[in-house]
Image (spheres, rainbow, N blue to C red):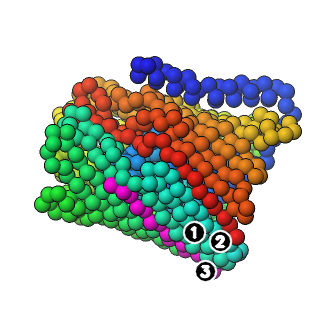
Amino acid sequence: MKPEWNSRLFQVLGMCIPLFALTLLLHGVSSASDTTATLDTITVTAERFPVQEAESSRMVTVIDADQLQETGGNNLLDALRRSGGFAYKAFGPLGISHGGMNSTLSIRGIKDGELVLINGVPIQGAAGHAYDLNTIPIEQIERVEILKGAASTLYGADAMSGVINIITKKPLDIKAFKGSVEFGNEGYGNQTAEASLPGINLGVNYQHLGSQSEISRSFSQKYRYDLDPTDRYAVNMNARPFERLNVDYLGSFTETGFKKIYDTGKPYEGTDQAQTKHFADLRYETTHVKSTLFGNYDIMRRSVYTAKSPDDANKNYNAGIETDGRFRFSDWGFTSGVSAIYRGADYSNQYGEHHRTDYALFLEAKRTFFDRWTLSLGGREQYIDGESGTADDDRFLPSIGLSWLCGPGLHLFANAGKAFRAPTFNQLYYSSSFLVGNPDLKPESGWTYETGVKYDAEWVRIRSALFYMSYTDKIEIDRSKGYPQTYFNAGDYQSKGVEWEIGLSPFLHRTGWMKDLYLYTAGYWADPTAENTTGNTYQAGPKFQNSVGLSYATLPLLLDINCQILSSRERNLNSYGAWNVYGKVQAGKGFLTFAIDNVFDTEVQITGDLSDTASNRYVYWDTGRLFKVGYEITF
């Protein structure tokens, strides 16, 4: 089948379920009673303090720990990828980082626009904007909240296209222990042990993947990369030493290696790689005040053992404090905050040590009119203090939002906000044979406009939004001159389209097993475009992503079947649709788990450049079919 027909097929397949769901909804609204679901989904990301998700003026998705587990994902990155609404990019199986090239989850086709948080504070390094969610086991997470659209008013620089906020587990006043083991082909293994005691959670995880042949290939330069066995160790601790005071720690160590093997018989090049990551925070939280002291440190060591070259020890480190308050004056509710974040990096063999400090003050005001209309007005003053000899930056970032309760369970919403992102140190200073930085880069900035609908009934849940995102000076890679490539500010960059999340329980009121069936879909269609160095427009990101699935959840059986579709991709990459199955069945005091990743062993290109004019035509592939079976028990 030709690539263009593959692309159309996946688009049609991906859009059939949401269109079918909307048809059912229109039929149901005309005949159903006014009974609606209780608004019990809470989000903190939409306004920095708890608020009912349906009442916010933003497109927000909340995915809890059970939902993450039921995707069958091998780590947090994989679970979010399967949840829908993201375009996935990676340079190795399971999202493993290849040197400084990291896996990403882009929003609405906008590359490098997502801000990633843990418990509301940023974790991305200033060197390359990396966040390495593949190093976080699902078992360490309580829920993930995803805010779509510009959020720089609330979260400052880097929140260009959206926010991914990872909420860690909270200590409970119970005593429980949990253990799980999982094994599969390709040498796969995943083992977890957790202990929940009054006031503290402790957890450890070990994951292994055997060696992988030909994870990537350069068709132009005639070589491939093989992956050595990969081991990941992770640990978490969440404690509440005093009421309202929480301490959290996440740590991981990942060890692997890469072999660059030439088709010509030239001796291969081998690189050992070890990455260590630490994140810690101290949080004080009340109903009206929150303050967080935090820090994270990441070091990647790389050693080329087949050549005499200096070892890499690339470091990223952030430290900061954020304080938020909530109060009322007259009929208005206010949320205010201040933050100071030090961001540093040391890439010894590329450009040395650099740092910057971000300061911010923000205020958001909210008022409800006539019990149905809620208006939000916000503004943030963002100041970036660069190191000596570099430019500082000072930006005002406004936003406005409106939510209208126009019927039982039916909300309409609209918002507009200005976004901003400073260049990373890699984009400014990097120096290698394949990529050099551009110290003359200007910060990215732009606006997001969005309007949509939220509908909740007993048997259906719908979230959908139309969006238009327009940027100036968006930083892109100039591939027109071959190697080394460099960066430039695109003259015009935009993405417009539609996003959706739909969940259906079509047989809710029937008797028997069918009443527990649940259909879901989440995705987007967008048209991301940018101007190249000559002013011509090109496709800047994938246009279509959708995840569709069917789940059945009741004791003693849980079963989830899902498919991830990505099509109309940039740089001539192939469209694909990958099916996954996850299930667990009660067996004794625990549960037997089983899963199949990529059921039909579809070829999944996770990044690359297959353009006819590319100076290097290459591609990276995802892992093929993976069978997994395990057992978990709680006591």
* Total marks in image: 3
Q: Position of residue 528 (x, y in %)?
A: 42, 31
Residue at screen point 17% across, 57% down: 306
Of mark 1 and mark 3, the one earlier in the sequence is 1
Residue 564 position within the rendered picture, expressed as x and y whole percent measured from the top left = 53, 37
Q: Is residue 566 visible?
A: no
Q: Amino acid at mark 2?
A: Phe
Crowd rating for badge 3 (residues with CA inside 10 Å; few <14, some 14–19, many 20+):
few
Disc 3 target residue: 241
- Left or right: 445, with 513 as reference point: left
N-term mark: 3 or 2: 2
> Is residue 476 or residue 85 the one in the foreground?
85
The C terminus lies in quadrant: bottom right
Circle 1 — which element?
strand
Tell me the quarter of the image containing the N terminus. Answer: top left
Amino acid type of the residue that numbered disc 3 sits on in the rendered structure? Pro
Q: Nearer the viewer, residue 11 or 477?
A: 11
Residues under numbered marks 1 and 2 in contact, where contact means CB atoms less than 8 Å apart: yes
Residue pictured at 76% horizontal, 49% vertical: 554
Residue that carries the numbered disc 1 in the rendered image: 193
x, y percentage for residue 490?
31, 35
Which contiguous range is marked in magenta? 228-249
- Report how far apart the C-alphas of labels 3 and 2 lie in the structure: 20 Å
Q: Is residue 576 above or below residue 251?
A: above
Give the label, 3 or 2, closer to the camera. 2
Mark 2 Cα shell of 10 Å, populated few (<14), some (14-19), many (≥20): some
Give the residue pinned by disc 2.
177
- Give coordinates of residue 457: x percent, y percent: 78, 39
For mark 2, give the secondary structure: strand
Residue 229 on the magenta segment: yes
Q: CA distance from mark 1 to mark 3?
A: 22 Å
